Image: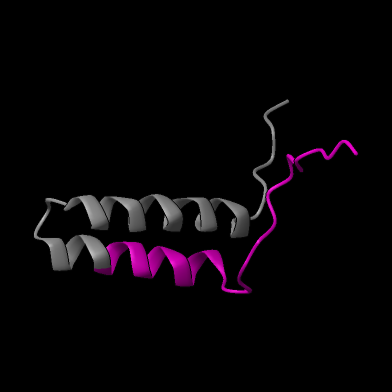
Amino acid sequence: MLHTMSTTVESVTERSAAEVNEEIRALWRRSGGTLSVEQREQYQRLVLEWAAAAPPTAKAA
């Protein structure tokens, strides 16, 4: 049996982009401007979550 991997990104959370953005800002404040390996991994997850939650931007005509 052949299985295929989904290529769609599904939001794991129902948080707004603003809520996720605030968590990103708090992470940077706690880190003092330098992220550890673990913090970088958390940051990357948060950025992906933020992108999924952010409203689409209007394209310029």
Residue 59: quarter of image: top right
User: Does residue 48 appear to the left or right of 8 in the view shown?
Assistant: left
Find the residue positioned furthest to the right. Answer: 1
User: Does residue 24 appear to the left or right of 33 in the view shown?
Assistant: right
Q: Residue at x 16, y 53 (%)?
A: 36
Q: How is the image coloured?
A: one colour
Magenta stretch containing residue 18, yes or no? yes
Q: Residue at x 57, y 73 (%)?
A: 15
Magenta stretch containing residue 54, yes or no? no
Find the residue positioned furthest to the front. Answer: 1
Percent coordinates x, y for residue 52 in the rendering: 61, 54
In the rendered image of this protein, does residue 21 appear above or below residue 59? below
The residues colored magenta run: 1-26
Taking depth in this image into account, of 42 and 14 the one nearest to the observer is 42
Q: Main secondary structure of the magenta part?
A: loop
Image quarter of the C terminus = top right
Q: Residue at x 63, y 74 (%)?
A: 14
Q: Residue at x 70, y 56 (%)?
A: 10
Q: How many marks?
A: 0
Taking depth in this image into account, of 13 and 1 the one nearest to the observer is 1
Percent coordinates x, y for residue 54 in the rendering: 59, 56
Percent coordinates x, y for residue 26 in the rendering: 26, 69
Percent coordinates x, y for residue 9 in the rendering: 68, 49
Residue 13: quarter of image: bottom right
Find the residue positioned furthest to the left. Answer: 32
Residue 25: quarter of image: bottom left
User: Does residue 57 appear to the left or right of 45 in the view shown?
Assistant: right
